[in-house]
Amino acid sequence: MSAKKKSKPASAPRAGAQSIAEHRFLFHKGRDYRAYEFLGAHILGGSGVGLTPEDVNVRGAETVPGGEQPSPAGTGTSAGTRRDRLSGVVFRVWAPRAAAVALVGGFNNWDPSASPMQRLEEDDSIWEVVQTNAGEGDLYKYVITDDHGKQVYKADPYAFSAEAGGPEDGHMRASVIWDPCKPFRWNDLAWRKRRDSCNPYRSPMNIYECHLGSWRRKEDGSFYSYRELAARLIPYVKRMGYTHMELLPIMEYPYEGSWGYQITGYYAVTSRYGTPEDFRYFVNKAHEAGIGVILDWVPAHFPRDEHGLAAFDGYPLYEDSDPLKREHKGWGTLAFDFGRPEVISFLISNAFFYCDVYHIDGLRVDAVAAMLYLDYDRGDGEWRPNRYGGNKNLEAIAFLQNMNRDVLGNYPGVLTIAEESTAWPSVTKPPSVDGLGFNFKWNMGWMNDALQYFQTDPLWRRGSHNKLTFSITYAYSENFILPISHDEVVHGKKSLLDKMPGEYEDKFAQLRVFYTYMFTHPGKKLTFMGAEFGQFIEWNEERELDWLLLDYEKHRKLQSFVRELNHYYTDTDALWETDDTFDGFRWIDADNADDNVFTYMRFSRNQKAVLIALNLSGKDFPEFDIGVPAASAYRRAIDTDMKRSGGTGTRRKTVYHVVDGGCNGYAQHITIPLPKFSAIILEKEG
């Protein structure tokens, strides 16, 4: 499909431009897209986040003549203090049904009685206190008391940083005061200008999906920091020829085994790898290298951890109040309430936050299907139809449409990507025509069919031939990314290399063909770390990838081949410029199931052509005729059977001349050797 026409976004004021009253009004309408400037912890008398001491709404029940409130130095106050004398940190939290809220931290010895918070006079759902002796780097939590007297220590939903440390730390997962508007020297203006002027549908996109904690580790097993990863990961990604990195969630999460997909601190980058400034440094270095940074984002659900969002004010608040919409039992998590305006403000503000504060280039939205369907992973009697009697979650649909419209409208070069695993229509069409409004959708159908075909024994592939051809029939119905993600190399599914049948040599040969098929099929590309050098075992988040495999020739040559293919893809506009139009692809022979051979062509907008031939059988074809459009010759560009790539070196010619003689519906053809488990890309000449 062609690049979509965008619906008009909501007018979002520039960062720091809204007053407190405007924030409050929009927050309760679900339209405050920078709620993080108002809620959370904000340093007074410094750069703040659109706040000054004059903005603080201080109040209290007791004052002394002259408006001064007697309170010990360094304690929290929420009354009568002259605003021009305020210093410290103002804390605000949304907790409408709490009976009481107190601020605790190192600044008051974690004493719940030291810094009680007060409801705002103008908005009794929001609590506030000024802590005059608090400052950047201090730990804090909120003590929420429900109307039964139960007290729970909660992290700040809008905290900009989170505590580092292990389970033995008594205040583990506390929030940390950090100023997101503190000066940082960004060097990425040129990058962002290029990004914002680029048409992503007609540009190369080759994404390296990465889990920062297990890409590499130090000798003692500890994590590299964001800054250390910037010095190692970014040059590697650049050298290998990828255009983007996609990071598994880096928002704060308590459970390592969740890989980051069960978030408790949506506004805090995880302290596992360093500070917020360190992550800014990482993104900045990526942009200096010409690499885009996409974050996995999880607005579908959150975990039940007591210090997190669950039952935040003693009752369902961020989660849905309807028991039939509240849980995802399969994951043991809670679903966001997409019908509550304040939750919508929280989530869309979170998307804006990463664009504003960290200059990220895209959000890949996880588990979209779980949001769209009321009966997702729910049996009979476990879900309630919508007002039209159907299974669509109308509030979630509206949220996704609004999020996409407003993020893409306010950040022209930022991408939104849907991991949507069903056949939901119009995921990448604009909301104005009832689409969800994403830029791209993961093509899960292509992924499932392709992997099933390649895992089939070559003797039986004849019966599965259409698994590699069917995807072309819908390739242009959405703007697709072809994903080979982390989900495909865990839980007994085997690594990508080990999915390939046969002996050692055959596995490598077929994986090179798989890569060639993937990179010549319409759609942008995504592969998970480790696949590029043939990780043999499944991914394990508790250890680094098996880089020692590069001591072995086959793995080094596979990595070299992937690097060559990556760079060829980026340099060859026929492989990406027409991903959104039928004019970019043509079968030569889609029906040669008996030989397990596929031949087709890709075209650029100016009709520059490349020809692709795949032999997925276990037999050699010394002379294989391929019908071709008129030309003088076809020149070899990529050959999976080259010795330098780990092949046999059977094809020694670099140019194949066109000769007369009908074949595949053309009046002329070329004849090439087609060894078993091999692929070749040829460029048309003359």
Image: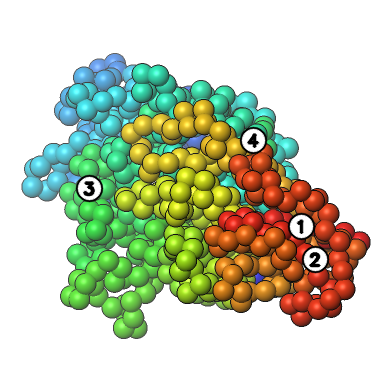
Q: Tell me whether the residue at label 2 lies in contact with that at label 1, contact meaning CB atoms closer than 8 angstroms.
A: yes
Earlier sequence position, callout 1 versus callout 4: 4
Determine if residue 351 is in view: no
In the rendering, which numbered label is found on residue 238? 4
Label 3 with label 1: CB-CB less than 8 Å? no
Mark earlier in primary sequence (4, 3):
4
Instruction: Out of 121 and 519, give the one closest to the viewer.
Output: 519
Q: Give coordinates of residue 72: x percent, y percent.
A: 25, 17
Between the C-alphas of marks 4 and 3, the distance is 39 Å
Disc 3: which residue: 304
- Furthest residue to the bottom? 389
**Which tag, 2 or 3, sits closer to the chain's start?**
3
Q: Which residue is mark 2?
A: 670
Q: Which residue is mark 1?
A: 682
Mark-to-mark CA distance, 1 and 4: 26 Å
- Which badge, 2 or 1, is on the more N-terminal residue? 2
